[in-house]
Amino acid sequence: MSLPAMHTAVGMSVPFLGGLAGFFRSKRVTARALLILVFAMIFCGLWAEVPDIPKFLSHGWIPHDPEHVNIFFFHGLLDKHQTEDRGLAEGFLAILTIFFCILFACSKTVLDNERKIAHLKSRALSKVKPLAIPKDVYYKDIVDIHCHVLPGVDDGPETIEESVAMCRRALELGISHTVATPHLPWRGNYDTGKITASHELLKARLGDENIPLRLSLGSDIRITWDLVEKLKGSSVFTLANSRYFLLELDDLAVPERLEDFIGKCAAEGYYPILTHPERNAIFHSDMNRLKEMSRLPMLIQLSSCSLVGMGGERVEKMAVELLRAGLVNIIASDAHAVDMRLEEFAQGLGVAEKIVGQAKVREMVIRVPGLVIRNEAIERIKIDQRSA
Ligand SMILES: [Fe+2]
């Protein structure tokens, strides 16, 4: 076999085999058309090297015959001017073939992605399809203690249809119990009557539509100097009427005497669950403070979406650090709409699983939030979680 012929044979056999494998896997017309082109090029390349097929079949490979090279346009063109450098022409053909193979692979990926994006864009609320989550990151019986699912009470869904869509999606994601936690105060008001009515309305609708999601009431409470009094006077809702409540801080500040406040709450029999500390700029630069606080009678809730970059790079990094340091008691969604943080909740659990393992994630999304809404003692929750 001549050297150029060897170039062709080696250079083209690899993409040929790759292309062949791709051909049988691909169902796409464009991809198939590209492959046919690749096969055609390979055939022409071989034809240029083997001018006489019957002779080839009876005598094997025949060194290149310049009279036949013009059959293949590129070959002939290059050969006419630089006959002495056939290797270059062969190499060029091989690279071109590889290029088309890569183009095939890319076209398949691009088409797939475009299809997915188009699907997401055209998705109507009532036609939300089940999310494809790998089985190994799918959890059943999740208790989501932080979700803005009630219609018309805060920056969550505006209509009950949107709320119902959220509930359906929550079920698909493995959530069996959601605690509805609207912001309190919302625009300066503590309108608990409106929230209770919205909760009752959604519960009734879930019953009418046979949606088996359990729905409890709570609230996402901004810290205020008189919060303990508000808790005692039922101006805010604890989680499922338990001793636990969601405590939200400003993202850019941590009150100087927060630790005293937590002590004051505990003395009155209330225990804060600090929401998404991974977003707080003060904790970013002073994680030790959070470590010290974790010893107090309180729990820490991470928002799953932070693990998939929804709050930015710094928040994502902090979320990972908190998990690694064992500071997270609960992971929740903090979802606000069917397409805001529910999908990311499921994706974030996959990330968490890679960091702390499946057993710990189950603790944080099923067992501990379950204990919270059953109003178990905080000592039990904390001791159990440490030894788990
Ligand atoms: Fe929230």
Image (spheres, rainbow, N blue to C red):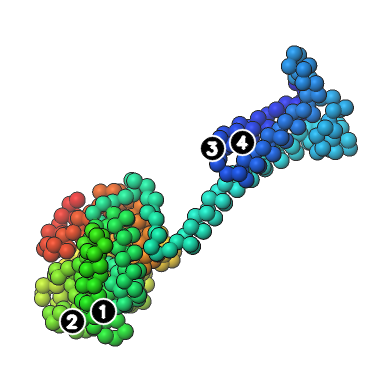
- How busy is the neighbourhood of tag 1: few (under 14 within 10 Å), some, or many (20 plus)? many
Mark 2 and mark 3 in contact (Cβ < 8 Å)?
A: no
- Which numbered disc flags the more N-terminal residue, 2 or 1? 1
Q: Considering only vertical position in the picture, is 17 above or below 337? A: above
Write down the residue under mark 4.
19
Rendered image quadrant of residue 13: top right
Label pair 2/1, CB-CB below 8 angstroms: yes
Residue 167 drawn at (x, y percent): 30, 63
**Label 3 vs label 4, nearer the camera:** 3
Q: Label 1 to label 3, Cα distance in Å? A: 54 Å
Q: Residue 262 placed where, x, y %?
A: 18, 74
Residue with the mark numbered 3: 25
- Answer few, some or many: residues within 10 Å of disc 3's Cα (few below 14, many 20 plus, some between 14 and 19): few
Would you say 254 lies left or right of 35 here? Answer: left
- Between 129 and 7, the one nearer to me in the picture: 129
Q: Amino acid at mark 1?
A: Leu
Give the residue at mark 1: 184
Can I make out residue 249 in this image?
no
Between the residue at mark 4 and the residue at mark 2, the CA separation in whole angstroms equals: 67 Å
At 85% from the left edge and 33% from the top edge, which residue is drawn? 70
Q: Position of residue 101 (x, y in %)?
A: 64, 40
Element at label 3: helix
Number of residues whose C-alpha sits closer than 10 Å to that of mark 2, classed few (under 14), some (14–19) or many (20 or more)? some
